[in-house]
Image (spheres, coloured by chain):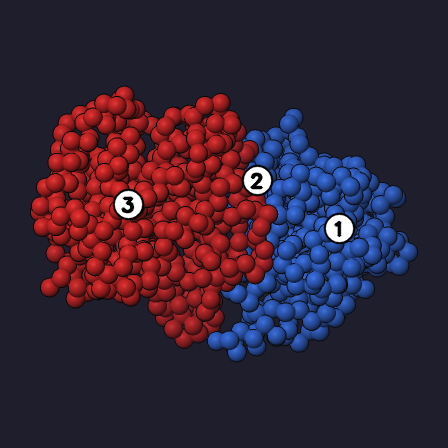
Chain colours: A blue, B red
């Protein structure tokens, strides 16, 4: 058994597709996945401001995001053939969308995949277009979290035997921090500085984003000194609990120019749902998300990416908590194992760094209305890669170096038991 | 064929309240010394489980019955012994039954355990409450003890019963109606005057029944919730009197006679004759004698070591909160959900006995048990593996200050068991600032919370003893 485990731990992504930094993983996904590179395009997007919308309902936000997306694509609601609605808990069934939009008996799929729900709506909508089933579809996500009156995330669970872990989301992700520090020899203070800098960067980016929930820079001392929530994580290490909605209009790539001079093409869509063995398997060390490693490898294969760090212009990643972003830099192949913290401290992922990460402020300061977040990430790619981001947060990797690819990464669950989505989108065909 | 006590164990919870903290906070009450305090996640059932585990650890004894007595039951109209039975992973053919109501009820389970054929586990536990500044608050204590009565053929008898006698009377000394959070007590001198003649009568007849004179007794233990009567009776015992531990852990009511006897047996030599007197709504006296086998008996968790391990850092306000006398603001989180009866029934092995599954081909241990192996994917090729007594090491941890907890913050640890297997557990009896990767832990049976009238029992990690 021991020998088997060792062998598995040492294995690398064996897809025949070489990515720059070898990634540890335990199991390989055995699947025939062909991708839909350059077959589907985004021709319009909408995104509400995220925040505490005491004055706006789920219906209001869906209506705003959908009509913003129609306007962006220059189409009407009648042009959309089918809808994919992502929400974790702000409604059930397609009626959640068809009623406020007053849809005329069109198909609406309501789906949920934890915090990756918005991306899952987008993925399934894209496949519907790629299959030829529909000409034009909408992926839309929404979440209304602030009506609950509770702190953090809550959700109804099926009746259980009472033995499931009851620790909160920040606590599950905070398990990464001591494990990472222990493995790579960081003392507590250094680890805290790294996490603080990640929050500081994302708040700084969010300060340049009028749609963000938090639009102020926050001093590092304030971040580091904020009240503790879980482990070393203070309140400023946690993403914003938020209301919001975002939407995208998708068509076949060959039709894209009918609606849009500069569409965004889908290069890769991958999704990995893990066996949830992190809390069972002693070989898992809480310094990685195996699901992210697997979904990244799959996405890079689909998109033909071999060196994500140099080939990608920007990434929107699931920075639900600061240690998550740190580990994601390594899991996504943006930094070598054990060096992600040094890169973060050196500014590699800043707005003007080699590879800007979360230029829109990320979950940290844009906010995290669950069902909307995956589409919000794509919205930033939509703005940045097409030169429509406000000048103050345009990124030199696009404007000066002319890179054309953006990555979004959306995560659900917790370390050791997660679902992970990765997309690559680009402003050019081929 | 000899018959008697073949195993025993006590449980004294980790926390101590320094009685002077009561005086400091309230301006009255309290006193000197400490009382043992059940943690926020303990009740008489969980303490009973821990005592029984201490009794059975390292032995092959499988009791035919679990007899449980307490004056502070976790459930009324539902047997509590069945949870202890489940937590000990005992077979369906073992009996589990409660005898509750008052500390005197503990005598019933002893008598039944001794008299009924087979191997019988008698577990007594109590969690003593009292109104702030009351004598019961300061003088009470929480704990449990378990005694296994059986035949020499099963396991060597450590202590045998020589004889005994009882004296019964109806009088109102202390009283509590169902649902009350504390007991009321009549004027102290009244009880003393009633108890002393009853005790003298019972002792005289017990010695006669055992056929020994008072001079042949080596140790005398006098136990009872009426401190003044116990003190009065103790004067005649002279240097044979053994300490009743009330200064160090308080009086644990239903459990106290058993805890004191366990402490005596922990340090007893072969052939010692012990007179145990129990004052509880009457008087009962028993004469016991240790056997040669006690010389070879090494208790798993001696009472003295548990007393010494106690932590007296508990604040009085926390004590009041744990006992429900202070209602503190909960976090802005949903209330915990009650466990579902059918899912809990389906997972009895896991939830109560902490039994996982081990893949026969790969050896991989799954906690909770799974049908499909995480190593190699074998389906339905698993065997039971009980992990309750397996020590483990912390792989990573966190302190959750947002989660609902009866005593925030919640400490969560990912632990790797010696010999394989991992679990993410809540940790208890620990200072959140002291948790480190690599620390050693062991499992303990606790009540996670109660919701809608259902107690949610499960296992937690605690720092390894010693």
Around disc 1, counting alpha carbons within 10 Å, would you say few (fewer than 14), some (14 to 19), or many (20 or more)?
A: some
Chain of the residue under the numbered disc 3 shown in the image: B
Q: Which mark is residue B239?
A: 3
Q: Residue furthest top?
A: B187
> Of circles 3 and 1, which is in front?
3
- At a point 28% along the width and 45% down the height, the residue shown is B239
Q: Position of residue B16 (x, y in %)?
A: 45, 41
Chain of the residue under the numbered disc 1 shown in the image: A
Nearest the camera: B436 or B352? B436
> Of circles 3 and 2, which is in front?
3
Nearest the camera: A304 or A83? A304
Q: Looking at the image, is A47 positioned above or below residue A133?
A: above
Q: Which mark is residue A193?
A: 1
Residue A290 found in image quarter:
bottom right
Q: Position of residue A336 (x, y in %)?
A: 74, 66
Looking at marks 3 and 2 on the same chain, the residue that comes earlier in the sequence is marked by: 3
């Amino acid at each position: 058994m021991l020998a088997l485990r060792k062998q598995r731990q040492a294995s690398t992504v064996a897809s025949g597709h070489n990515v720059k930094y070898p990634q540890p993983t335990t199991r390989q996904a055995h699947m025939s996945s062909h991708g839909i590179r350059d077959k589907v395009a985004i021709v319009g997007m909408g995104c509400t401001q995220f925040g505490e919308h005491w004055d706006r309902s789920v219906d209001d936000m869906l209506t705003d995001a959908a009509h913003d997306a129609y306007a962006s694509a220059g189409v009407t609601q009648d042009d959309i053939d089918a809808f994919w609605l992502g929400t974790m808990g702000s409604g059930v069934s397609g009626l959640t969308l068809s009623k406020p939009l007053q849809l005329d008996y069109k198909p609406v799929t309501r789906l949920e995949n934890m915090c990756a729900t918005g991306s899952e709506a987008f993925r399934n909508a894209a496949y519907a277009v790629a299959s030829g089933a529909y000409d034009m579809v909408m992926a839309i996500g929404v979440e209304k979290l602030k009506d609950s009156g509770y702190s953090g995330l809550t959700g109804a669970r099926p009746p259980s035997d009472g033995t499931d872990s009851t620790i909160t989301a920040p606590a599950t992700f905070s398990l990464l921090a001591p494990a990472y520090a222990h493995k790579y020899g960081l003392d507590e203070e250094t680890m805290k500085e790294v996490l603080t800098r990640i929050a500081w960067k994302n708040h700084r980016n969010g300060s340049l984003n009028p749609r963000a929930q938090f639009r102020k820079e926050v001093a590092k001392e304030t971040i580091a000194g904020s009240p503790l929530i879980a482990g070393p994580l203070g309140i400023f290490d946690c993403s914003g609990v938020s209301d919001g909605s975002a939407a995208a209009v998708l068509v076949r790539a060959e039709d894209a120019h009918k609606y849009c001079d500069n569409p965004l093409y889908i290069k890769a869509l991958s999704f990995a749902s893990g066996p949830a063995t992190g809390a069972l398997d002693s070989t898992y060390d809480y310094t990685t998300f195996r699901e992210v490693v697997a979904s990244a490898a799959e996405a890079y294969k689909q998109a033909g990416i071999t060196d994500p760090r140099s080939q990608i212009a920007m990434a929107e990643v699931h920075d639900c908590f600061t240690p998550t972003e740190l580990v994601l830099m390594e899991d996504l192949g943006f930094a070598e194992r054990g060096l992600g913290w040094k890169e973060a401290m050196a500014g590699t992922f800043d707005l003007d760094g080699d590879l800007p990460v979360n230029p829109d402020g990320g979950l940290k300061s844009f906010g995290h209305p669950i069902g909307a977040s995956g589409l919000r990430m794509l919205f930033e790619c939509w703005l940045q890669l097409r030169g429509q981001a406000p000048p103050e947060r345009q990124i030199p990797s696009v404007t000066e170096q002319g890179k054309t690819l953006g990555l979004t990464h959306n995560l659900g669950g917790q370390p050791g038991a997660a679902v992970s989505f990765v997309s690559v989108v680009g402003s050019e065909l081929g | 064929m000899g018959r008697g006590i073949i195993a025993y164990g006590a449980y004294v919870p980790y926390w101590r309240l320094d009685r002077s903290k009561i005086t400091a906070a309230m301006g009255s009450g309290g006193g000197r010394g400490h009382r043992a305090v059940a943690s926020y996640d303990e009740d008489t059932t969980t303490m009973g489980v821990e005592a029984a585990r201490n009794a059975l650890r390292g032995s092959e004894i499988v009791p035919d019955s679990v007899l449980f007595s307490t004056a502070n039951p976790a459930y009324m109209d539902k047997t509590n012994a069945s949870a202890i039975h489940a937590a000990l992973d005992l077979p369906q053919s073992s009996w589990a039954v409660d005898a509750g109501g008052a500390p005197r009820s503990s005598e019933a389970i002893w008598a039944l355990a001794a008299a009924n054929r087979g191997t019988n586990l008698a577990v007594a536990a109590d969690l003593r409450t009292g109104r702030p500044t009351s004598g019961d608050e300061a003088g009470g204590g929480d704990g449990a003890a378990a005694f296994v009565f059986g035949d020499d053929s099963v396991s060597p008898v450590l202590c045998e019963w020589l004889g005994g006698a009882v004296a019964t009377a109806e009088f109102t000394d202390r009283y509590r109606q169902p649902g009350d959070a504390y007991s009321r007590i009549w004027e102290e001198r009244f009880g003393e005057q009633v108890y002393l003649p009853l005790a003298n009568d019972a002792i005289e007849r017990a010695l006669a029944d055992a056929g020994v004179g008072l001079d042949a007794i080596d140790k005398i233990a006098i136990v009872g919730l009426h401190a003044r009567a116990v003190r009065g009776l103790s004067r005649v015992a002279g240097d044979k009197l053994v300490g009743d531990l009330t200064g160090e852990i308080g009086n644990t009511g239903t459990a106290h006679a058993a805890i004191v006897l366990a402490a005596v047996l922990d340090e007893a030599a072969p052939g010692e004759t012990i007179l145990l007197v129990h004052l509880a709504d009457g008087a009962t006296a028993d004469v016991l004698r240790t056997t040669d086998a006690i010389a070879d008996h090494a208790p798993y968790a001696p009472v003295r070591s548990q007393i010494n391990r106690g932590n007296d850092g508990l604040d009085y306000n926390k004590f009041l909160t744990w006992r429900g006398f202070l209602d503190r603001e909960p976090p802005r989180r949903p209330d915990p959900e009650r466990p579902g009866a059918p899912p809990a029934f389906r997972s009895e092995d896991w939830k109560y006995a902490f039994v996982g599954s081990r893949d026969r081909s790969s050896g991989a241990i799954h906690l909770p048990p799974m049908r499909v192996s995480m190593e190699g994917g074998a389906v339905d090729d698993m065997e039971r593996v009980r992990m309750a007594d397996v020590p483990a090491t912390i792989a990573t941890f966190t302190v959750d200050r947002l989660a609902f907890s009866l005593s925030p913050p919640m400490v969560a640890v990912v632990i790797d068991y010696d010999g394989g297997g991992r679990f993410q557990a809540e940790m208890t009896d620990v200072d959140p600032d002291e948790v480190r990767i690599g620390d050693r832990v062991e499992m303990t049976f606790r009540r996670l919370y109660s919701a809608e009238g259902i107690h949610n029992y499960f296992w937690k990690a605690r720092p390894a003893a010693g």
